[in-house]
Image (cartoon, grey):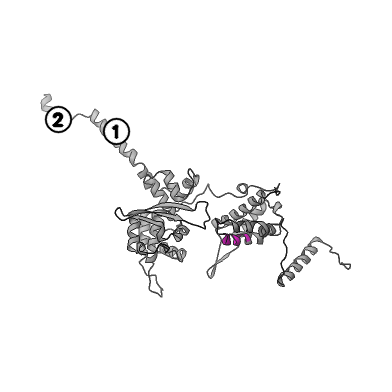
C-alpha cells in the first residue's frame, strides 16, 4: 500500500523472489532456509553424498536438482504422500533430452528419482535432533510393480539371429561398416548375466582363465557403483573364452577395457529390430535370459543369486529375473521324467511275461 506494507502474503513472496533473482544475477550467494527441501539438500544432503564414496554422486546431484525444482520451497517436514505422487506424475509428463531429440520418461526412470527422494527423506529423519512427525515411509508412498513383473524374453535362437545381424551393413551407412564390434559384448551379457555398466568396468586384469579347459572367471571390482555390492565373481564359459581369444582380449594390457559399450543403446536396438526380436526386449533382458537358462540347467540358487548380485534368498530373482517359457518347464522336469520312465520299465518287467514264456495256440491244443 502507500505506506510500503504488503497487502497479501503472495505480494510479499513475489517481492522476495524478485529480490533473490536480482542478487543471484549480481553473483551474490543467497542463504537458503535449511528447513526447506532445497535448503536441506544444499546444506546437508549433498555434502553427505559427496563424502560417501560408494555412489556416483555427480549423477545423483542432477536428480536432486530436479527434486529441488519441484519441491524446493516446501518445508521438508511437510513433504507428504500426495507431494511424492504429484512429483512422480510431473516427472512422467516432463520430457528429457537424449542426443538431439526429446524422450518420454519411463516408469523405471521415474523410480530412480523416487529412490533418491527416499534417500533424502530417510537421511532427514535420521539427522540428530531432527525427527519429523509427518515423515512417511517410502514404501507407503510408492511401490514398485511387483504384481506385474516384466515378461519379455529372448530365446537362444533369437539371440543367435541378433549375432548374425551384427555382420549386416545397415542401409544408408556412410561408413559401410557392420556392427561386429558389438558381438563380444552381447555374448558377454548373455553368458555372464552382467549389466552393461558392469561390463563397461571390466579390464583385462580382472579376467582369470585356464587355457587347457578354456574357461575362467571375471573378478569384477567397481570403485564407484550405485549398488551396495561392489565386487562380484562370475564364470567365463568356453563360448565366451573362444570369443575373447578371437577378439585379441588376452593380448591387452591389464588396465585396458575388454568390452565395447560405446553407443550401445542405439546399436542394440537396431540389431534387435533387424533380427526380428520383440521391441520389449532390451540389453537388460539378456541378464534375465541368463538367469532363467542357468536355473533351468540346474544351477543352485545361491550361486545364481551371487552372480546376479542379489542377496541370498532375495525374492527379486524369482519375481523379476526367472522368466520361464514352456521349454524351461519341460527341461526342469527332465529328472522326474527319467525317474518315471525307470519306474514304468520296472513295472512292465513285473507284470508282463518274458517273450519265451508266451504259449502259442498249438501248444495249448
| Front one among 323 and 125 | 125
Q: Residue furthest right?
A: 3
Residue at 47% across / 50% down in the picture? 309
Residue 265 in the image: x percent, y percent?
47, 63
Residue at 41% across / 49% down in the picture? 292
Left or right of residue 357: residue 4: right
Question: Dot 1, crowdedness within 10 Å: few (<14), some or many (≥20)?
Answer: few
Left or right of residue 315: residue 341: left
Residue for badge 2: 356
Q: Is residue 194 visible?
A: no
Q: Residue furthest top?
A: 365
Left or right of residue 215: residue 315: right
Q: What count of labels does the image hold?
A: 2
Residue 220 in the image: x percent, y percent?
44, 55
Give SS at disc 1.
helix
Residue for badge 1: 343
| Front one among 205 and 235 | 205
Rendered view: 180 above or below 237: below
Q: Is residue 175 visible?
A: yes
Tell me how far mark 2 sits from mark 1, CA to CA: 23 Å
User: Which residues, given as a range, are shown in magenta?
Assistant: 54-64
Residue at 58% across / 53% down in the picture? 115
| Front one among 11 and 231 | 231
Amino acid at each position: 500500500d502507500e505506506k510500503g506494507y504488503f497487502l497479501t502474503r503472495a505480494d510479499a513472496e513475489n517481492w522476495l523472489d524478485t529480490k533473490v533473482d536480482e542478487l543471484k544475477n549480481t553473483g551474490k550467494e543467497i542463504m537458503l532456509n535449511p528447513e526447506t527441501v532445497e535448503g536441506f539438500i544444499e546444506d546437508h544432503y549433498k555434502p553427505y553424498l559427496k563424502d560417501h564414496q560408494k555412489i556416483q554422486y555427480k549423477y545423483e546431484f542432477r536428480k536432486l536438482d530436479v527434486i529441488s525444482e519441484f519441491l524446493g520451497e516446501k518445508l521438508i517436514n511437510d513433504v507428504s504422500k500426495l507431494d511424492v505422487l504429484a512429483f512422480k506424475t510431473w516427472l512422467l509428463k516432463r520430457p528429457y533430452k537424449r542426443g538431439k531429440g526429446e524422450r518420454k520418461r519411463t516408469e523405471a526412470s521415474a523410480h530412480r528419482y523416487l529412490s533418491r527422494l527416499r534417500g533424502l527423506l530417510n537421511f532427514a529423519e535420521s539427522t540428530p535432533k531432527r525427527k519429523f512427525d509427518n515423515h512417511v515411509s517410502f514404501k507407503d508412498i510408492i511401490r514398485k510393480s511387483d504384481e506385474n513383473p516384466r515378461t519379455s524374453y529372448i530365446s537362444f535362437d533369437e539371440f543367435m539371429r541378433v549375432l548374425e545381424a551384427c555382420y549386416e551393413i545397415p542401409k544408408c551407412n556412410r561408413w559401410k561398416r557392420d556392427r561386429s564390434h558389438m558381438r563380444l559384448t552381447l555374448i558377454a551379457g548373455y553368458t555372464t548375466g552382467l549389466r552393461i555398466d558392469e561390463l563397461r568396468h571390466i579390464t583385462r586384469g580382472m579376467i582369470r582363465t585356464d587355457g587347457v579347459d578354456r574357461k575362467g572367471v571375471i573378478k569384477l571390482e567397481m570403485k564407484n557403483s550405485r549398488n551396495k555390492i561392489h565386487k562380484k565373481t562370475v564364470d567365463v564359459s568356453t563360448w565366451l573364452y573362444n570369443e575373447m581369444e578371437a577378439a585379441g582380449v588376452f593380448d591387452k594390457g591389464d588396465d585396458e577395457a575388454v568390452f565395447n559399450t560405446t553407443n550401445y543403446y542405439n546399436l542394440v536396438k537396431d540389431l534387435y529390430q533387424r533380427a526380428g526380436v520383440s521391441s520389449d526386449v532390451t540389453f537388460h533382458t539378456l541378464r534375465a535370459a541368463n538367469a532363467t537358462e542357468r536355473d533351468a540347467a540346474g544351477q543352485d540358487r545361491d550361486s545364481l543369486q551371487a552372480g546376479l548380485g542379489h542377496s541370498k534368498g532375495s525374492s527379486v530373482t524369482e519375481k523379476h529375473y526367472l522368466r520361464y517359457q514352456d521349454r524351461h518347464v519341460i527341461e526342469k522336469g527332465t529328472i522326474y521324467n527319467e525317474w518315471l520312465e525307470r519306474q514304468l520299465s520296472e513295472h512292465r518287467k513285473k507284470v508282463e511275461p518274458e517273450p519265451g514264456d508266451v504259449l502259442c495256440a498249438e501248444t495249448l491244443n
